[in-house]
Every structure is written in C-alpha cells, then in structure tokens.
C-alpha cells in the first residue's frame, strides 16, 4: 500500500542575495566542441507514450513529478553551461501558474532538418529523445529521471511556448499538450543567444500544479553550488519573492554554507581533477571534493553524480570514504600520533562536512530511489585520486593534519569507551535474555518482513497498545518519554543512554559501521506518540536519532509515524474517528446537515466552521459526558465530540481500530526529500547554537508549529 509521506524538510533556511556580476564559468571537463547542427539530431518517437505513462518519464505525477518538469528544462540550460555557452539561468513562477525558464546558451537549433523537412526546434520539442545530445561525450544523465528531454515537459503541459534567440533573430513556436499549434515564426531580431521556455503543467496529469518556491529554491541553490560561477535566479511573481544564487567558490561555498551553524576545526580542503581522453570520451571523468571538520559529532557528506544528489551514496562515496580512512590511519601511524585504539572509518568522519561531486559519461543509477551510483570502476578511481591528494595535502599542511587527527583520535577513544560501557551494561543485565530488552513485548512471527515494532510514548499507552495489538506480527516497545537529544551528544553518551540502547537492541541491526540491515527484526518501525506538544517533541527526538544513526532505515522506507485520531464523533450509534480539525468540521457538518435542510451541505468549509462556532454555540455543552469521564467532551445537538488528549486515553480496542489495525489506520512514511535541508533543520533545531534556532523559529513559524521543538 502506498503510504502518505512525511517530508523531513520543507523550508529553505535563508535567502541568498548574491550579486550577479563577474560571471565566470569554469568548465571542468569540456566535451568536444563539435557544433551540433540540425542534421545531427536523431529523431525518435512521438509523445503519446509520455502522456499515457507520465510517471515512467518523470518519476511521479505528484508534487515531485511537477517540480521535475522545471528541473528538466533547467538541466538543459545547465548542459549549455557545462559546454561553456551559458552563464545565467532565470526561473520564474508566473502569476497565471506557468513557469518560465530563460538561459543565455546557444539556443535550440532552428534550421530545417533536410530529411524531415521540419525545424530542429519542432523536433526537439515534439519528439521523444530528439536532440543531438545523447552521445556519450557529454554528461547527460541517462536512465535517471533527469535528461529525458524537454519534449517530455511539452507533452505534460496544456501549453508551452518556446522562444529562441539565435543567428540574430528571435524565433517562437507554441504547442498544446505536446503538439505544435503554430509554425516556427520569426518575431524579431536580437544580437543575443538563448532559450526561453514557458509552460503550464497539465492538471489532467498532475495531482497538483502549484509550484513551491522553497522546493525550487533549494534545488536551484544546490545546482548553483555545483556549477561554480553560474548565476541562477528564482522569482515568484505571485508574491514578489526572489533568490539569486551564484557561488564563485562552488562546492567550497557549499561546505561553508553547510557548516554555517557549526564551529569549524580547519579551513575548507578542496581538490579537483579532470580526466579527459578525446579518444575515449566515454571514459571522461571529473571530480571535485571539498571538506571541513567541525566540532560536532555528526558526519555530513553529500555526494553528487552529474549534479544529481546521490542520497543513497554509491561507488564514488565509498571510494572517498576508503581513501579518507586509509590516509588518516597511515598519517597517524607515520607520525606516531595513533592512540591506543585503531581508527575506524566512522572515527575518521566524525564531525566532517564534505561535498563530493563527480561527472561521468555513463552513470548507472541504482537503489530504491535511483539515487545510488552503481558504476563499479568509479570506487577505485575516486579512492586513488582522493588518496593521492589527501596524503600530499596532509604532508604539506602538518598543522591541519594534526588538528584533524587529534579530533579523530578523540573520536576513536570515545567509541572504545562506548563499546566498553555497552559491554558492561549488557553484563549488568539491562538487556535481558537473547539480548532483547525486558520492556519489549515481542510478536510471535519471526519473519522480519511481516513484523512491525511500535515505539510508544509512555507506559500507559504502552499498556493499551500491548493489549490492543495483533501479537502475531506487532511488537510494542514503551519508552520513557523524551529520549536523549543525539544532536548534542557524542556516540558514547548516545549508546549508553538507556532508552536508545533499548531501541538499538530491539531492532537488532546495530548502528553506524556495524549496521547490518539483514539483522533488522522488524521491517516497519512505527513511532507512536501523543498528538500534542510533548508527543511532537518526542517524535522529533526519535527522528533525530534515526536520521543521525540509522539513516539507512529512513532511506529504505522502514520508518513510519502513526496517526492517532484527534477526535471521536458520535451520533446515535455511529462513531467517526477524525484525524484533523478540518476533518472534524467536515464530519460535524455532514452529521448536522443530514438532519437539517440539504442546502447546508453545499456550503464551503468556512461556512461550516462558522456554523459550529456561532449558530450551534448554544448547543455546546461543556460538561463531561458520563461515559467518557476522563476526556474533553463537547455536545453539539445530539452529536458528541470527544477530544483525545493522549494515546493513553484510548482503550485497547479504540487504539487498535484507529491507529494500529493495518486495514483502517493511516501511517506516514518518513522520507528525506532534501538532504541539505534535513541536515540544516536538525542542526538548527536540535543543536547547540541558540541564535540560529531563534531566527529559524521566527522565520518558519508554521513548520516549527508542526514539529514543536
Ligand atoms: C539541442 C541541441 C543543442 C542545444 C539544445 C538542444 C538546447 C536545449 C535547451 C533547452 C533549454 N535551453 C536549451 N538550450 C539548448 C545544441 C545547439 C547548437 O549546437 O548550437
């Protein structure tokens, strides 16, 4: 069953207001500059396939898919920048709901194709995979969601208008649902070059057609970091918001940005290398790496392949990690600064912030969300390039090397202390038979794929859920309120924290480098807290723990948040459980309408709220209903509305029916929509610094209201 998702992150942290000047694009790897003419464009098929199965081309027809349309057009402009022809990209969300992307690249070719006798522009816009850009000497992404071609955007738009400035003229053509409705027409002259695309996403295709400024903004900012010197602006004509991104420091600026609310230990270490072989263009490869340690305990590495955030990592990330561990160990050994304990990879990465961005000709994207780089030869290539660079960097910068290594040695010592403390705790019997915690009410099924673990707030709710559950496949672990804030603690404190060590033992898959998904005892882990301020805080603390120590479970789609109902609405013998205030108003309205005149039903939601607030006011009885003595109960006519203050107030049957029964419950799946934002939010909300948190809370009142930290 498809679960609704909880996005860890939905906001951008701060506006970036850089001036757009001194435009300089440094093209790391130049593809061979053979000019594309109209003739080199290969024609493939029409667009009907795209409208039939849109998700195949853009991933989904939801919020994500909608925004992919913009990224698809922007990717084409970025390709022009990579080829050295474009320095500026402007994105606009227009008042009428359309989106415009303008670049100053070469402009899509307009010449008439001799074989087909139509303009190349029309071919690019109306044929799938048409474009002279599918040869391997560019870094076009194949197989992934990007790079499907701008014609896909055309196919999924009610209308699209393109304008091309090229050869001293301005050309235009209009399309509707992917079909041309005008000729390519000259509408003026210009000395400039470039492409302007305006499109209206088709509401027959998409569940929503409303663009989000924040979502576009974070991706465009990321693209600006990854493409040094390229100016990317975003304007929201609906409310006048504007961001301009341009980073002459590229990923060095990216690392500085990521460490903005942290305390750095060293300057940013940067390295880039291109491997270009004109005879073997399919082996072309470039790498950029920027890294800086800070005094926190978190590892924060972002990896990209062809500008795509490889959230699931892959061979480039593994190559970097191996090189780092190896170089740090050998430097420490050579200089006699190795402590008693050997340095593990995790120690070497404690407090690191790094961005690794590679470009390659034929990327293979794998994994659940197609964000894991699979090219097997890349690990060795990255490992040897990074290894060579880092060892000479440390040799040439002994002061930095010592700072880094003394931090790493401290991490190793703390980890060793943590291991010993855990060992001791185990012997002292905090963890009972079979290594499972005594508080765990396990299920009888032993197939992890069928099993669920509920992490429940408090003993009282723990009790009702234990009684209410299906003990065949549902296990219950009651937790004592607030778990440790892992954002502020080093690993030794984290693993010796009682509640956390109980969670780790119950799950069975360990954390960090010892993490082993094959040992995971439950494939669904469900956080179940009260729907109030404390409950939200606990959920956030638990999310922080999973995000920092078991991110794999989030990436694997194993983590969920239960949705207990807020109200129980009863009229006569029928009972409704509702999960939000809007839903409550709606149900009350329906129940009221069914006894009154039908015309009430046609009122909108506001009307209903008013009805309840005003005209029904005299009917509201504040006295407690006899049967529901513990709960806040209101009477509206013959309708009884009962507010659940906590899970503990529900009896086991109610808890089963509303929150635990797979047939009737709603679960929210936790996903990482935007890794950069997710890190920033956890750092800001849960970390040491007070000022950024205050500022963030002011700027994002709504989100924080939901998180309530
Ligand atoms: C096909 C061939 C060439 C450029 C483009 C397409 C192109 C597409 C888009 C979409 C948005 N902006 C774009 N800019 C360029 C090569 C052009 C040449 O050889 O002159």
Image (cartoon, rainbow, N blue to C red):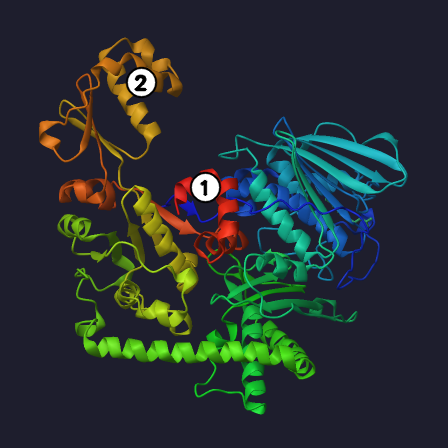
Vertical comparison of 30 with 405: above or below: above
In the visual, does 524 lie left or right of 262?
left
Residue at 57%, 36% (x, y): give it: 211
Give the image location of residue 233, x and y in percent: 70, 43
Q: Position of residue 473 (x, y in %)?
A: 21, 56
Q: Earlier in the sequence, mark 1 or mark 2?
A: 2
Residue 172 position by quadrant:
top right
CA gap between label 1 and label 2 equals 27 Å
In the picture of the structure, the residue carrying the numbered disc 1 is 703
Q: Secondary structure at mark 2?
A: helix
Q: Which circle marks residue 54 in the picture?
A: none
Q: Residue tagged by mark 2?
A: 613
Image coordinates of residue 34 in percent, x first then y, are 83, 58
Return the x and y of residue 643 as percentages of the image width and height: 23, 32
Q: Secondary structure at mark 1?
A: helix
Q: Is residue 360 left or right of residue 419?
A: right
């Amino acid at each position: 069953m498809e679960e609704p998702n909880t996005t860890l992150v939905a906001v951008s942290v701060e506006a970036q207001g850089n001036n757009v000047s001194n435009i300089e694009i440094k093209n790391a790897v130049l593809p061979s500059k053979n000019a594309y003419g109209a003739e080199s464009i290969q024609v493939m098929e029409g667009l009907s396939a795209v409208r039939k199965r849109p998700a195949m081309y853009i991933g989904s027809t939801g919020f994500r898919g909608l925004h992919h349309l913009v990224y698809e057009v922007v990717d084409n402009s970025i390709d022009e920048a990579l080829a050295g022809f474009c320095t500026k990209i402007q994105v606009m969300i227009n008042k009428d709901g359309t989106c415009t992307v303008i670049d100053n690249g070469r402009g899509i070719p307009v010449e008439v194709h001799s074989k087909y006798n139509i303009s190349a522009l029309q071919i690019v816009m109306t044929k799938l995979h048409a474009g002279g850009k599918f040869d391997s000497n560019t870094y076009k992404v194949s197989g992934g969601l990007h790079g499907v071609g701008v014609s896909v955007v055309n196919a999924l738009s009610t209308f699209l208008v393109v304008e091309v400035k090229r050869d001293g003229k301005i050309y235009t053509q209009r399309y509707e649902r992917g079909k041309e409705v005008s000729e390519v027409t000259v509408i003026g002259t210009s000395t400039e070059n470039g492409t302007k695309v305006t499109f209206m996403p088709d509401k027959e295709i998409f569940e929503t057609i409303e663009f989000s400024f924040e979502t576009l903004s974070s991706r465009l900012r990321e693209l600006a970091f990854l493409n040094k010197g390229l100016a990317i602006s975003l304007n929201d004509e609906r409310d006048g918001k504007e961001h301009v991104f341009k980073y002459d420091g590229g990923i060095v600026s990216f690392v500085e940005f990521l460490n903005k609310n942290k305390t750095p230990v060293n300057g940013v270490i940067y390295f880039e290398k291109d491997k270009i072989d004109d005879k073997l263009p399919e082996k072309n490869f470039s790498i950029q790496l920027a890294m800086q340690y800070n005094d926190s305990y978190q590892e924060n590495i972002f990896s990209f392949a062809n500008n795509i955030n490889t959230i699931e990592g892959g061979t480039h990330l593994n190559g970097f990690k191996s090189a780092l561990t190896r170089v740090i160990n050998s430097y420490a050994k050579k200089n006699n600064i190795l402590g008693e304990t050997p340095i593990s990879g995790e120690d070497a990465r404690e407090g690191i912030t790094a961005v690794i961005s590679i470009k390659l000709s034929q990327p293979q994207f794998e994994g659940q969300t197609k964000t894991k780089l699979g090219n097997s030869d890349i690990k060795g290539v990255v490992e040897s390039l990074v290894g060579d660079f880092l060892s000479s960097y440390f040799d040439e910068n002994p002061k930095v090397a010592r700072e880094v290594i003394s931090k790493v040695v401290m991490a190793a010592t703390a980890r060793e202390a943590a291991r010993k403390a855990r060992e001791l705790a185990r012997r002292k019997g905090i963890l009972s038979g079979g290594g499972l915690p005594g508080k765990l009410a396990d299920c009888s099924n032993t197939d992890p794929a069928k099993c669920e673990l509920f992490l429940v707030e408090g003993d009282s709710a723990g009790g009702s859920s234990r009684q209410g559950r299906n003990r065949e496949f549902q296990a219950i672990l009651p937790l004592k309120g607030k778990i440790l804030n892992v954002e502020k603690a080093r690993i030794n404190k984290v693993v010796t924290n009682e509640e956390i060590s109980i969670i780790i033992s119950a799950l069975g898959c360990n954390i960090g480098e010892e993490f082993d998904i094959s040992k995971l005892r439950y494939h669904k882990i469900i956080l179940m807290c009260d729907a109030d301020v404390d409950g939200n805080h606990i959920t956030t603390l638990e999310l922080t723990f999973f995000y920092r120590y078991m991110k794999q479970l989030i990436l694997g789609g194993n983590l969920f948040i239960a949705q207990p109902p807020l109200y129980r609405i009863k009229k006569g013998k029928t009972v409704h459980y509702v999960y939000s205030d809007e839903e409550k108003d709606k149900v009350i309205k329906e129940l009221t309408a069914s006894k009154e005149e039908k015309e009430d039903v046609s009122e909108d939601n506001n009307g209903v709220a008013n009805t309840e607030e005003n005209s029904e006011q005299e009917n509201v009885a504040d006295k407690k209903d006899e049967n529901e003595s513990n709960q806040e109960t209101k009477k509206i006519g013959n309708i009884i509305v009962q507010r659940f203050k906590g899970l503990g107030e529900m009896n086991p049957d109610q808890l089963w029916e509303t929150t635990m029964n797979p047939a009737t419950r709603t679960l929210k799946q936790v996903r990482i929509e935007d890794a950069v934002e997710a890190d920033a939010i956890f750092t800001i909300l849960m970390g040491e610094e007070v000022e950024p948190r205050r500022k963030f809370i002011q700027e994002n009142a709504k989100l924080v209201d939901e998180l309530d930290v």
